[in-house]
Image (cartoon, rainbow, N blue to C red):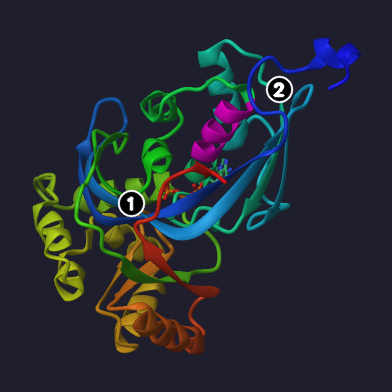
Amino acid sequence: WRPDDEDERPRRGMVGPVRVRVPAKVNLHLGVGPLRPDGYHELNTVYQAISIHDELTARRGDTLTLTMEGEGAGELALDETNLVIKAARALAAHAGVPAHARLHLRKQIPLAGGLAGGSADAAATLVACDALWGTDLSRDDLAGIAAGLGSDVPFLVYGGTALGTGHGETISPILARPVTWHWVVAIADGGLSTPAAYRELDRLRAEYAAPPPLRNADALLAALRGRDAARLGRALGNDLQAAALSLRPALAETLKAGEAAGALAGIVSGSGPTCVFLASDAGHAERVAAELTASGLCRTVRTAYGPVPGARVG
Ligand code: ATP
């Protein structure tokens, strides 16, 4: 800095670009309770962050702008409706700083895929702008702001494997001895709207006399502690799966194809249409992925592992 630049120098925060990587999530267990008066369903879910990442770069700017490349480019609005812009504004309002940044998003997580891509981008923005602006908030503070942006956003601030309660926004990390689980991720053409999947679930449930009680995650948590992939496969469960299959019957073929390809178990991820399959190790995941690709049922098939950390600089 030359002395006459002194006034221009940001008083806090990073001068150079801040790059944040953020993972996708899968729900290993998704128990959906009855619709609450506030319009949310009560959830009991186990999230896991997996190794498919979006990347957000934040630079100093005079206003707030967003550009993007990759999944959804040209489709996703980059205006005030984008969760990245909403997250930057929420952090700026919380910290009392101007929301000035040039943000660039590189997206690999498919849009409306059930992998919480938009929520991931919001979490990445909170972490990136916190570093860029030097607001220096704790993870818990960032997760508090995240809860106002969407049910899955707090989890993506933390990552790992965690229990989500409330409508998914109350996070309790699951501290298990480290073990890596291997996944095959089958990405379908087009997205499924999360609110539409919940509406379909309500419609299907209305055909029964009483709504089923909220399913807890005990079996899944025990399977995680047991570190046995076959047992984990048996414990995977998603109450939204019936709704996703009802809206997109072709997903049943994908689930069958994954199991025929030798996966330990398959499940619709969140509200779909992405399906995820559990494999016993990295080589097994590659073999299942190759067979699923050959089936021609999916737009893209990827392997991934989890748990991985949440939104992180670097
Ligand atoms: P979930 O698993 O949490 O239900 P999803 O993976 O099905 O989420 P997302 O990709 O997170 O779905 O986004 C759903 C919708 O959110 C998109 O269709 C889009 O309209 C809106 N949205 C706003 N900002 C973003 C963003 N940065 N990336 C993706 N979607 C966004």
Front in this rendered view, residue 21 or 272: 21
Q: Quadrant of residue 222?
A: bottom left
Q: In this view, does 99 lie above or below 159?
A: above
Q: What element carries label 2?
A: loop
Name which residue type carries label 1. Glu
> Mark 1 packing: few (<14 Cα in 10 Å), some, or many (20+)?
some
| Magenta-span inclusion, residue 127 | yes
Tell me whether circle 1 and circle 2 mark residues in contact (CB < 8 Å).
no
Q: Nearer the viewer, residue 176 or 88?
A: 176
Q: Where is residue 163 in the image (x, y as percent from the top left)?
A: 23, 44
Q: Which residue in the protein does label 1 denote?
A: 200
Residue 100's tag is 2
Q: In this view, does 283 lie above or below 27?
A: below
| Relative depth, front residue between 183 and 40 | 183
Q: How far apart are marks 1 and 2 (CA)?
A: 40 Å
Q: What stretch is highlighted in magenta?
A: 122-132
The answer to whether 99 appears left or right of 180 in the picture is right
Q: Please, what is the three-letter code of the amino acid marked with disc 2?
A: His
Nearest the camera: 16 or 235?
16
